[in-house]
Amino acid sequence: MSKLFVISGSSGVGKGTVIKEFLKKHPDYKLSVSCTTRPKREGEIHGVNYFFLSPEEFKESVSNNDFLEWAEFSGNHYGTKKDFVQNCLNNNEDLILEIDTKGALNVKNLMPEAVLIFILPPSLEELEARLRGRHTESEEAIQKRLASIKTEIENSKKFDYKVINDTVENAVKQLENIMEKSA
Ligand code: 5GP
């Protein structure tokens, strides 16, 4: 039976890096490609990092009921297409969704068998420093992201597992343990 893992965490917590390292060691897991209306960052590729949609295209997908879940995050829309998830599970692939906490809890409601994992920073100060260190966002965008952190940490209480990202290596190990337990 293929498994669905949903990984969330505060912005800048390094979940992207942890997941990338995990996938390098475990290429048999597949990472879901979400849709978003946010502008492409340098180096990002349509269909690899995200499907970049216009607000109109996104709205159309919402009204066509194409999304398993979708959410607004920092002024942009993000969503997971139902057919993407279903195709992977039908192909017996273990799938990882990297989505925000609201989206994760919505997935859990629809698919209770999904395993929810929350990645936490070692401290809030560390998190703010990482967010600023990325130099990819404006001050306004950073403030918005920081504001959403409190809610996210509150929501994390409803997750199946928590992983503390003190070092990438440690976090990957914790993920491996969770995946093994859930197999
Ligand atoms: P970023 O803009 O940094 O790539 O992502 C911002 C937030 O959107 C992250 O917390 C990420 O996990 C979340 N996100 C990415 N794809 C989806 C999705 O399909 N659904 C939801 N609900 N959140 C998503």
Image (cartoon, rainbow, N blue to C red):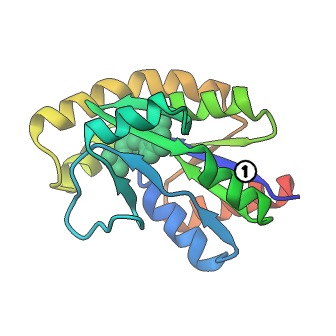
From the viewer's perspective, tell me whether residue 56 is left or right of residue 13. Answer: left
Position of 6 relative to 160 (above/below): below
- For ligand 1, tell me if the residue under mark 1 lies within 8 Å: no
- Mark 1 is on which residue type? Leu
Mark 1 Cα-neighbour bin, 10 Å: few <14, some 14–19, many ≥20:
many
Quadrant of image for the C terminus: bottom right
Q: Residue beneath label 1, please?
A: 4
Q: Is residue 63 visible?
A: yes
In terms of secondary structure, where does tag 1 sit? strand
Residue under the point 19% across and 66% down: 42
From the viewer's perspective, tell me whether residue 89 is left or right of residue 144. Answer: right
Locate residue 168, reporting x and y percent. 50, 64
Position of 96 relative to 121 (above/below): below
Residue under the point 19% across and 48% down: 132
Residue under the point 38% across and 56% down: 51
Locate residue 57, reporting x and y percent. 33, 41
Q: Is residue 12 visible?
A: no
Residue under the point 70% across and 32% down: 108
The quadrant where residue 26 appears: bottom right
The quadrant where residue 127 appears: top left
Position of 79 relative to 59 (above/below): below
Instruction: In this rendered view, identify the residue nearer to me: 138 or 166.
Output: 138
Q: Quadrant of ligand 1?
A: top left
Quadrant of image for the N terminus: bottom right
From the viewer's perspective, tell me whether residue 2 is left or right of residue 98. Answer: right
Locate residue 130, reporting x and y percent. 28, 51
Instruction: In this rendered view, identify the residue nearer to me: 182 or 153.
Output: 182
